Amino acid sequence: MTDRMGFWAKLFYKYRRFAKAISLYLMIAGPGIIVMVADNDAGGITTYAATGAKFGYGLIWFLVLLGPVAYVVQEMTVRLGAVTKRGHAEAIFDAFGSFWGWFSLLDLALANWLTLITEFIGMTAAMWIFGVPPYITIIIVSIVMLAMVLQGRYWTWEKIVILFCLLNLIYIPAAFLVHPSVPEVLAKGLIPHFPGGLTGELLFFLMANIGTTIAPWMIFFQQSAVVDKEMKEKDITWAKIDTAIGSFFTVLVAIFCIIVTGTLLQGVNIQSAAQAAQMLMVINPYVGTFLAIGLFNAGLLGAICISLASSWAFGEVFGWAHSLNNKIREAPWFYISYFLALLTAGAVVLIPGAPLVLITLFVQVIAVTLLPAALVFLILLLNNEEVMGKYKNTLAQNILSCAIVGALILLSTLYAISVLFPGLFG
Amino acid sequence: MVSLKEFVAEAKAFFTRRFRVIAEINRKYAKPRIKMTRMVRWSLLLLRLYLIILLLILAYKFILILQTM
């Protein structure tokens, strides 16, 4: 009898500990999941849809590899933010001086603005499928985004965004609805190979997929979010778990998106996710609708995070109040810069005849080209013992992150060569 | 109604204030915390220049594709 009571007491104790751990995780959770899921933005969904249509399941293995790579990069930003209590822009200015600081800030501003344009492209294209004109979409989205940040609390903003993150999982039921052959997905998707050989086109898609999985804005966003959430060193472990869960979901959604177009639209020349959604509406209205909703949601998530990443970065450097916990009167320039970014990016989308799809794909490639510069600063910061103390990079982390930088530079170089000498790669 | 002279003066004052802010930022971060060796500084600069060249090649490709569209 005593043994049985002891068993139940132990079980209850374990349950209490588990419940406490979960609630502690839920308090910390946010920046990691948000940055990773928002990473599957409109440009990302377009890239995955085009990848699936072009190569079928052939590049799923590559995305599986990118998950841990994204985790390695983002985990470093978590440590940096929690230890320094500073955003990435300010950390670069402080550590490397104003020359490198301005270089990084202007890089970020340009890349983010271009990416923001692609988010609006995705959102307007998705809503156009349901008959909503682009200018109406832009106005409504801008109002929603402004309302979200103007309510004056980081925690409220975070919880709303996490709801949008959950909607990002819509590609999973869509993939089940297309009834893919699981043995075929596993056989063609998980064995590393280059479908059709190492051509210039494949290099472009590899770079676009990398650019959509790891982007400079993610480094700046997560570090600033960690600071705005007032995370401390003791929260690092939970923040790492948050980031790992986020990277798992980002790869999961990417794979399911590829499965959708790889099953129903393989061999079809897809220029955009919206085009894929329209085609799928004819084959299976539910799948088409899910893809369209997912595309809109992806664009909205991306727009929310990217515009904030820029505003946070400028606020850190220019010394403005720059927290979501500030009201508009307390941080006017923070909110003005946010609004201006939305306004100008939305305006580009409304230019008649603008090559929107081409812009979307190229922006992903631009992001990956600029990424090595951001990563090098991140690695140097994480190796500064004076600042990081016991949280500085280990040898293994340095080797891994340097290998990532090397691989990115190599891939960018190969693509540049394929552009200049098209005959070399076929 | 603001005269042209007043408008130019206002615009001049606006940009002077902005440049003053930038000058203050440059002064604040004039001394980097991390001391980079000359080799590291030059490597970083070369990396940046190389990436800018790659970006220009991308822009060239973008224009090429636009012309064929």
Image (spheres, grey):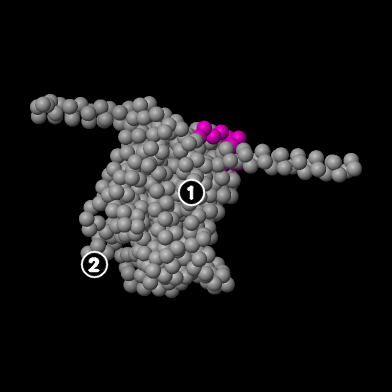
| The quadrant where residue A364 appears | bottom left
> What is the three-letter code of the residue carrying label 1?
Cys
Q: Residue at x 31, y 65 (%)?
A: A420
Picture coordinates of residue A145 (x, y %)? 38, 41
Q: Residue at x 45, y 51 (%)?
A: A39
- Along the line of sight, the residue nearer the viewer: A43 or A397: A43
Identify residue for label 2: B68
Is residue A265 shown to the viewer in this render?
Answer: yes
Q: Which mark is residue A165?
A: 1
Q: Residue furthest right?
A: A1
Q: Is residue A337 magenta?
A: no
Marks 2 and 1 sit apart, C-alpha to C-alpha, by: 38 Å
Rendered position, A327 above or below A144: above
Q: Secondary structure at mark 2?
A: helix
Query: Residues at marks 2 and 1, common chain?
Result: no
Direction from residue B60 to residue A1 in the image, left or right: right
Rendered position, A95 above or below A210: above
Tell me where the magenta segment starts and ends, as one range.
A229-239
